[in-house]
Image: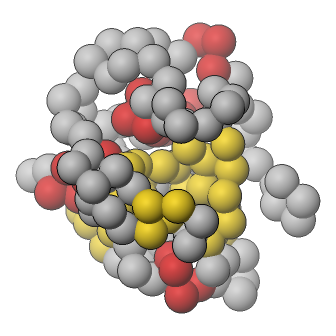
Amino acid sequence: PSGWTLDKPINTSGYLATSYEYKQCTWFTWNRAKDFGITFGMYMGNGADWQHQAGYTVTTTPTLHSAVSFSGGQTVGGQWNADPQYGHVAFVEGIHSDGSVLISQSGTGFSTVYTFQVLTKAQASQLHYVIGK
């Protein structure tokens, strides 16, 4: 995306479909974290569940290469809302000095396997960031 640089390119061809279904937000976030040597559990649940899993540090401070968990119905950057029942999860690719946050994400509602979205500092401050291991 314009004005942003990824620390590692995204290549989903090697992404595993283990306990997370292909092209779901959980599948993408779990695999994208693995690109950086970061692990999350195989059974973290739906996107909204990630922020409630025991054994993980969760913060409201945007954190590079963390998972960002959206509660059911929560706005995703003011452009759309997470599923009311399942929520959403995405991966933090970058944080600018103005507090804006670049996320990468997947889901059945997107026309491509993954997409990017920029969150403003105000939007990003409303979310929960799950630190992988």
Q: Which quadrant holds residue 95?
A: bottom right
Q: How many marks?
A: 0
Q: Is residue 54 above or below residue 19?
A: below
Q: Residue furthest left?
A: 54
> Which residue lies at the image location 22% right of the left edge and 49% below the top edge?
85
Q: Which quadrant holds residue 78?
A: bottom right
> Which residue lies at the image location 9% right of the left edge and 52% below the top edge?
54
Q: For the N terminus, which image quadrant?
A: bottom right
Front-lying residue, 129 or 23: 23
Q: Position of residue 4 (x, y in %)?
A: 82, 60
Q: Position of residue 115 (x, y in %)?
A: 67, 42
Side of 115 where 34 appears, left or right: left
Front-lying residue, 14 or 109: 109
Q: For the C terminus, which image quadrant?
A: top left
Side of 18 where 115 appears, left or right: right
> Which residue lies at the image location 50% right of the left edge and 76% below the top edge?
124
> Which residue lies at the image location 54% right of the left edge and 88% below the top edge?
122
Q: Position of residue 37 (x, y in %)?
A: 48, 34
Let me know if residue 80 appears in the view: yes
Q: Is residue 65 above or below residue 16?
A: below
Color scheme of the displayed model: secondary structure
Side of 83 where 34 appears, left or right: right
Front-lying residue, 12 or 108: 108
Side of 97 where 41 appears, left or right: left
Let me know if residue 50 appears in the view: no
Q: Residue furthest right?
A: 2
Q: Is residue 49 above or below residue 57?
A: above
Front-lying residue, 20 or 42: 20
